[in-house]
Amino acid sequence: MSDEERIATTRWRALFDLPPRAVYLDTAAHAPMLRAARDAGTAALASGNRPWMPDEGAWEARTEHARTLAAHWFDGDADAVAFVPSVAHAVAIAARNLPLARGDAVLVLDNQFPSNLLAWQQRCTEVGAHLVVARRAPGMDWTQAVLDAFLAHPSIRVAALAQARWDDGAVLDLDAIAVHARAAGIELVLDLSQSLGVLPAEVARWQPAFVASVGYKWLLGSTGLSLLWAAPRWREQGVPIEHHWSAREDQEVWRFDPHAMPRFRPGARRFDAGGVLDPLRLGIFEAAQSQLRAWGRDAVLARLRALTRQFDDALEEAGLAAWKSPAHAPHFCGVRPPAATFGTVVAALRAADIVCTARYGLLRIAPHLHVQDADIARCVDVLAAAVR
């Protein structure tokens, strides 16, 4: 790394609100907070104590500005984006709207994250449909497992998938999957919580029905504010989970006419959840988006790729190559120590103030721009020392 690059990484770390010694490698669970986002949240809390100073026009403009910022990560169309409290809420919208009948099937991945699983279990129970689980055979990647499932189960009508798996960072080739899904009449519902903000979301190519993502991982926002992207058909025909005045046309909803249903606001705004755009969440979201746009997605991706590559190389040099994920996303990865040593390794990381997710025998290493080369080296040193 050049001196200029080293200075840049030091400046990046200074933008995050982190203790000096901590090595935080858990962005895939929750990103560390930017100082600017913290300050925006503090200002929002202060403004919330002045409810006598509302400005509905300014609030509407601010909401639409946030929608435009969110649309940047998809296809730039603000009409396609709704704000919801969680990915589970977004997937529940998809499950409610997509046609599914007795005998039909929904494809999920083995050990799929619950937010993109539970709603499909419920919907299948209601209509007499069933789940098909794509499982990876030895030597097979997840993309092939999905394509094989498409061929083996012509009853599949919906494929509920991710771009990068939540546990070990394995990446699915959504370009290839989308081609086969369209040919088979299968609707895609994508959870991009582990990729949006780092990997491109090529919705024009994939043509999904719905896409969801949390805002607090790679988008560096807060909990309670997630994104839902809806395809054009569902922006016009979709039915939301909840019905509230702010998703309806203003002039109509305030007529209080019990015999005339107010029209929805245009586009995916019909799916906006009530109350999620409070000053605190919105302020943090805006600050995070401003910083991400300043860095640029390509620059973020390049730096995170360099960090995970350094991590992989250091594992090999330490004689721990067998622990590595065979193929993973450029921005995070999984590490699987021998089962007998897992508890010892986890304890060593905690003692060294190194934070990562440790579940089901797997360590998930997920840095962001606050992580420096020395942090990666220290992490691998601790891993190696724990099993000597």
Image: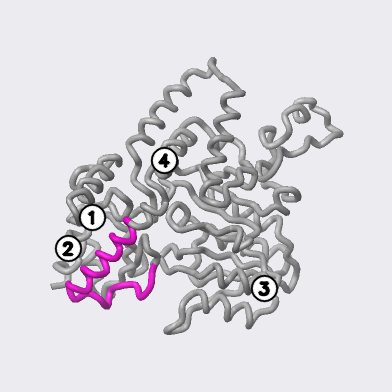
C-alpha distance separating marks 1 and 2:
9 Å
Q: Which residue is mark 2?
A: 382
What residue appears at the point 64 percent right and 44 percent down from the top-left corner?
A: 79
Q: Which residue is mark 1?
A: 354
Disc 4 vs disc 2: Cβ atoms closer than 8 Å?
no
Which sits earlier in the primary sequence, circle 4 or circle 2? Answer: 4
C-alpha distance separating marks 1 and 3:
43 Å
Question: Is residue 309 within the magenta segment?
Answer: yes
Q: Which residue is mark 3?
A: 156
For disc 3, the neighbor class at 10 Å (few under 14, some 14 to 19, many from 20) is: many
Amino acid on which disc 2 is placed: Val
Disc 1 vs disc 2: Cβ atoms closer than 8 Å?
yes
Q: Which residue is mark 4?
A: 288
What residue appears at the point 69 percent right and 74 percent down from the top-left corner?
A: 184
Amino acid on which disc 3 is placed: Ile
For disc 1, the neighbor class at 10 Å (few under 14, some 14 to 19, many from 20) is: many
The region drawn magenta spans 303-328
C-alpha distance separating marks 3 and 2:
46 Å
Disc 1 vs disc 4: Cβ atoms closer than 8 Å?
no
Tell me the element at label 3.
strand
C-alpha distance separating marks 1 and 4:
24 Å
| Residue 308 spot, x, y in % from top left | 30, 63
Q: Nearer the viewer, residue 181 or 358?
A: 181
Amino acid on which disc 4 is placed: Ala
Horizontally, residue 153 falls left or right of residue 323, namely right
What residue appears at the point 58 percent right and 51 percent down from the top-left corner?
A: 75
- Comparing marks 4 and 3, which lies closer to the viewer? 4
Amino acid on which disc 1 is placed: Ile
Which sits earlier in the primary sequence, circle 1 or circle 2? Answer: 1
Residue 21 vs 109, above or below: the answer is above
Which sits earlier in the primary sequence, circle 1 or circle 4? Answer: 4
Q: Quadrant of the C terminus?
A: bottom left
